[in-house]
Image (spheres, rainbow, N blue to C red):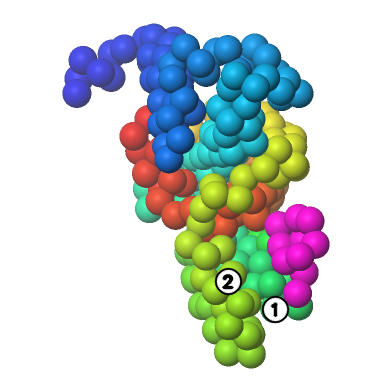
Amino acid sequence: MSELRRLNPRTVAIVLTIALVIVVINALTTGAYTIKFGEVFTVLFQGPAATSDANSVSHAVFWNVRLPRVALAIVVGASLAVAGVVMQGVFRNPLAEPATVGVSGGAAVGAVIAITLGLSKITLGVQVFAFIGGTLATAIVYGLSRVDGKTDVVTLILTGIAINALSGALIGLAVFIADDDQIRTVTFWSLGSLGLATWRAVAVVLPLAIIGIALSTKFARTLDLMALGDRSAAHVGVPVERVRLQTIAIVGLLASSAVAATGIIAFVGLIVPHIL
């Protein structure tokens, strides 16, 4: 372990990038329909518009099924991982994750409402409602935790737990009044899946992920200082309350967009920061 800690960050980044490429190629070639390794590059260079009889099935599977799933998995995984890092820095708690501020619960409520209202037949209808629900839940948690212009970490956590509990109750109520088909849709959505990934979903989530990740990098050193505690961070010039508001907003953006695209994906935001 001590040897790993002495590795150059650039070396670690290169190794992880190579590992990602290997995983991506494996994901593109394996499945119910096998695509040969060499065929992957042939289909890739042909582009999405090519229609060759020799590999029409491979072309359709590659461009319409597997590549959108892989792309969405990378974007959503990165969003949740960065959101988890920010949460653990803001809360100074290694067990913090995006769901701590009620993002997942709020997104689930929005999605369930959309499904019970029959909006699942509209393109991206469920995703839009899930994004709105997650964003509102984050705003409510922060608003309820703010007293005399300040927020406390413990209060934020307790409020997030309360909002998650309320979200669970609202989901239960929606399921109670939903019909069988809607209940089945709610169940599959809440499990989280990349099975319905499309290029349109990737196009919607990708800009939000880029914006959120780019903004979060500006708070790296600030979060290191906040790990010393609010008072110590304030003494060295960190505007603690403003940073907390901004970082929680970034978490809401990243996590809401990710959950809206794939449903509730647990554990990524918690464990990936610790692995890295």
* Nearer the observer, 209 or 118: 118
Q: In the rendered structure, which disc, 1 or 2, sits on the residue that comes first in sequence?
A: 1
Q: What quarter of the picture does the C terminus occupy?
A: top left
Seen as rendered, the residue at the extreme front is 53
- At which x and y percent is residue 226? 51, 41
Secondary element at image label 1: helix
Query: Which segment did they paint magenta?
Result: 118-129
Residue under pointer 1: 116
* Nearer the observer, 34 or 226: 34
Q: In the rendering, which numbered label is found on residue 186?
A: 2
Do the CB atoms of the residues marked 1 and 2 lie less than 8 Å apart? yes
Residue 126 relative to residue 197: left or right: right
Position of 166 relative to 247 (above/below): below
Mark 1 crowdedness (10 Å alpha carbons): few <14, some 14-19, many ≥20: some
Q: In the rendering, which numbered label is found on residue 82?
A: none
- At which x and y percent is residue 177? 64, 90
Q: Residue at x 56, y 63 (%)?
A: 189
Q: Residue at x 57, y 78 (%)?
A: 183
